[in-house]
Structures are given as C-alpha cells and as structure tokens.
Amino acid sequence: MKKSTIWILGVIMGLSFLSLLYLQISYMEEIVKMRNEQFDESVKRALMSASKDVESAEVARWLREDLSEDEQKVWAQTQGSESGVVQSSKFLFKAPDGTLHSSVELKTFTNKPSPLPRAMISRKHGAKTIPQTARSYADMLKNRYLYQRALLDDVVFNMLYHASDKPVEERVNFKNLDQYIKSGLIDNGIGNFDYHFKVIDSDGREVYRCSDYTDEGSESSYTQPLFLNDPPARMSLVKVHFPGKKDYIFDSISFMIPSLIFTVVLLITFIFTIYIVFRQKKLTEMKNDFINNMTHEFKTPISTISLAAQMLNDPAVGKSPAMFQHISGVINDETKRLRFQVEKVLQMSMFDRQKATLKPKELDANELIKGVIHTFALKVERYNGTIDSELNATDASIFADEMHLTNVIFNLMDNAVKYKRPDVDLHLMVKTWNEAGKLMISVQDNGIGIKKENLKKIFDKFYRVHTGNLHDVKGFGLGLAYVKKIITDHKGTIRAESEPNVGTKFIIALPLLKTD
C-alpha cells in the first residue's frame, strides 16, 4: 500500500474519531447545562415559596398581636358560644426519616339551634315586626364588618410601616424557615438534597447559620429575599447552599463517561496502529535496501579474495616471500571487511531484540585501534585519503567486547568516508589519551560536517542527516545508534562536535580497567 493511501485513510479515520469525541463532549455539555437550569429553577421556586410562607407567618403573628383584647374576647366568645360547635382535626406530613415538613389544621363549625327565638313577635302596640328586627340585625352586622375592616386596615398599615424596623431574628422563626424551605424543595421535586442555609440582615450581618454550613462553590449557593415588600435598603436575605449539587450534575452524565473512555481508547489504538504501519513499512523498505546494499558490499571483498587466491596459484608468487605476505595480508583484511558486513546484519538483528550480548575481556585499546586503522587503510587509500593516529594514552587497558568495540571504531571511520567532501581529499585523525580514570578516543574527519540542529539527533535510531542532492550515500540510520548503544552498554559516553564544511569529531570516554 502506498504511503499516500495510508495517510488519506489515517486522516479520514482520525477526523471521524475526533468528530465523534466532539459530539459526545457537546452532548455532555448540553446535559450539564440543562440539569443546571432545571435545578436552578426548582430551587428558585422553592425559595420563593418559602419567602411567601415567611411573610404569611408574619402577617398572622401581627394579626394575633394587634387585635384588641376586647376583640380577642369577643372572638373567643364567638368561637366558644353555644350557638356553634368547633371540631378541629390536624394533619401532619412527614418524610420517611421522620422529619416534619408541613401541617394542616382543619376546623369545622357546626351551628346548633338556638334555645331562644332570634326575634320576639309581640302583638302589643309599638312592638317591632319581623322585617324591622331583620333590618336591625343586618345593620348591626354591617357596622361590625366596617369596624373589623377598619381594624384590619390599621393593623396592615402598622405592619407595613413598622415591620421592616424590627430585627430579622424577631420577625422570623428559623426552625419554621427550615421547614418552609424543606417543603418548597419537596414540592419542586428536589427534596432529597441536603442543604444548609444562613440568614443575613440588611446590614450584611449574619444572624443565623446552620452548624454545617460552608461557603464552598458559589455555583451551588442561592440567595432569596425573605420579605419581598421590604425597602431594598432594609431587605434581609436567606442564602442556601447545596453541597451535593455537583454530584447530582455528575450523575446525570455518568452514563456517558464509559462511551467517552472507549472512544479515546479507540483513538489512541488507531494512532498507535498507524504508527506501527508506517514503522513496519519503513523497516520493510530498509531491509530491501539493506539486501541490495549488502549484495554490492559483499561483491568487493569476495572478488578481492578470489583474485588473491588466483595469484597464490602463480608459482612466481610462491618464490617471493614479500609478495606472498602481501597477498596473505590482503586476504586477511578483506576477510575482516567481509566479517564487518556480516556484523551489520547482526546489528539489525540486535535492534529487533532491543539488546546486545557482550563478551567483555581485558583489551589494549591502542592495539585494537591500530588493527582497525590498518584494515581500514585500504578503503581510505581508494579515495586518495590518509589516516593519521596519535595514540598517546599511557593506560589503554579496558574491559570490553572486542568485536563490538572494533565495529564502533570501524563505523565512525566508515561514516567519515561516506560523508567526505568531493572536492577535498579525505583525512582521518584518530587519537587516544587519558582523563581522570577514563580512556578517551576521538575520530576526526574533514568531511561535509553536520548542522547544529541535526547534531543532537544523529544518535537516534533510523535518523539520517539530509545530504541534499547527494544520492550515493547508502545507509539505514543504524550505524551511530549502534555506536551509542554499545558505548552506553560499556558504561561509557560519546558526543559529537561538528561544523558544516569543516568536519566532524566524535569523542568517546570509556572507563579504564580497575586493577588492585
């Protein structure tokens, strides 16, 4: 499958998952908004009902307190007269937990026949007739009604004029206020919520507060004037807080959370799958390139060894010890080179396993580097290049894997050949020295160099520096990653210094062999 096709499918699927996530989140936001509005409206209606109940209670109290004693006596006599019987029934409304929410008292008035006639009928001169007696009784009721209405008007006027002057704690029974709020919440369908409230007077002073009241979360608190008809400057407030509101809102969207989580998991899985597809595609291309390159790389040492073997069959070569030794050296060097190419295959296998098996032993790094330089000199000479060395380390004893450390030095030199400048002869400088219990190794070239922004990435796996229009540089981005891994496994460090069109210098630090 083409890379462009994978990208198109990936973008389409990615946009689909993101759109699904957006719709789910939008739906959850709408549910939360709707639940908030419903809850706010229910609480406002409940508090308004409680406020009206408080006002009604105050009116009833004023009526009881301001009626004259005579009127109260008359009222009591009227209620208790023989002309009528009062039957009272009281109904209580309680919650399942036993809390009293509201009560209703039903009074029934039953009139008894009067033992005396309502009007006396007399045939004597000057006695009142029945119609006259009825008119007098009607006038008496009318006069009493006017008197009572005037009395009530006076009470209402005094209440409106003087009520707001009294302290709120004298006007409100806080236990009754709690019952009013509870009843209002039940009537509006949210009576199962815990709430706390406090009362604030017109001066902003807190006159009552529930023992467990908290001011946390302004979104969960509601304020309502206790007496709506009071002047604004004298208005007292009740502030109610619902600590369980957030849980109520969360419960309304909790059923959507598993769906949201599954969508996110699917999105992450899809992204990871696309990453694996691209990685496998890159590995497949890499392996194909590797096979093609290795075929070319194997041809040179094999042909050289074949040519040297044919020369050994020449009797003249056997008569010349110097020529025989030279041909034997070429065969040995090309065999090492062939082994190095085989090691590249092992390097790729090592990266697939994510681990390397080291077989460390005591080595003399100077001698190891001399052998690598001697082997690599043939390749450098092919490009009219030179290798110089300054192996000045007085203590070069290290505990390392000979094969892998040889490959490290060989890789660094091979990179110098790959990235040499076409208009300048290649020159390599290899140095060793000691620093504070460490063996320092540097490999420096005069190649094309590396830009500063690329320098920090050169040890990353599969990373290759762009070479512009230069297409003859073969590789897989594994060489320096392999070098970094081997040096790290030997408890060492490696860093690079480079300047474009000047060259690159790799500096390795390895711990020295500890001896008693």
Image: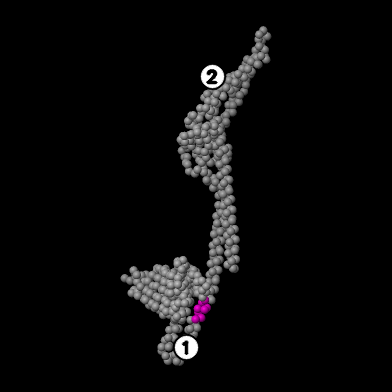
Q: Residue at x 41, y 73 (%)?
A: 444
Which residue is drawn at the image coordinates 43% and 90% (left, top)?
A: 318
Q: Nearer the viewer, residue 449 or 30?
A: 449
Please tell me whether the stretch drawn in magenta is mainly helix, strand or loop: helix
Q: 505 above or below 379? A: above
Residue 231 x/y as whole percent: 52, 32
Q: Give the magenta range.
A: 293-300
| Residue 502 sits above or below residue 268 on the image | below
- Where is residue 135 drawn, in percent x and y? 65, 16
The secondary element bearing badge 1 is classed as: helix
Is any atom of residue 252 visible in this view? no
Q: Nearer the viewer, residue 144 or 98?
A: 144
Quadrant (top left/top right/bottom left/bottom right) for the N terminus: bottom right
Which x, y percent locates residue 245?
Answer: 53, 44
Left or right of 47, for residue 329: left
- Nearer-the-camera pick, 126 or 349: 126
Amino acid type, label 1: Met
Q: Residue at x 43, y 70 (%)?
A: 498
Image quarter hosting the C terminus: bottom left
Residue furthest left as drawn: 516
Task: State how the image is colored.
Answer: one colour
Q: Quadrant location of residue 260?
A: bottom right
Q: In what element is the residue under mark 2?
A: helix
- Separation (CA) of disc 1 from disc 2: 148 Å
Task: Read off the residue under disc 1.
Answer: 311
Numbered label attached to residue 70: 2
Q: Identity of the amino acid at label 2?
A: Asp
Question: Is 302 left, or right, of 435 in this rendering?
Answer: right
Residue 161: say if magenta.
Answer: no
Image point 56% across, 33% down: which residue? Answer: 52
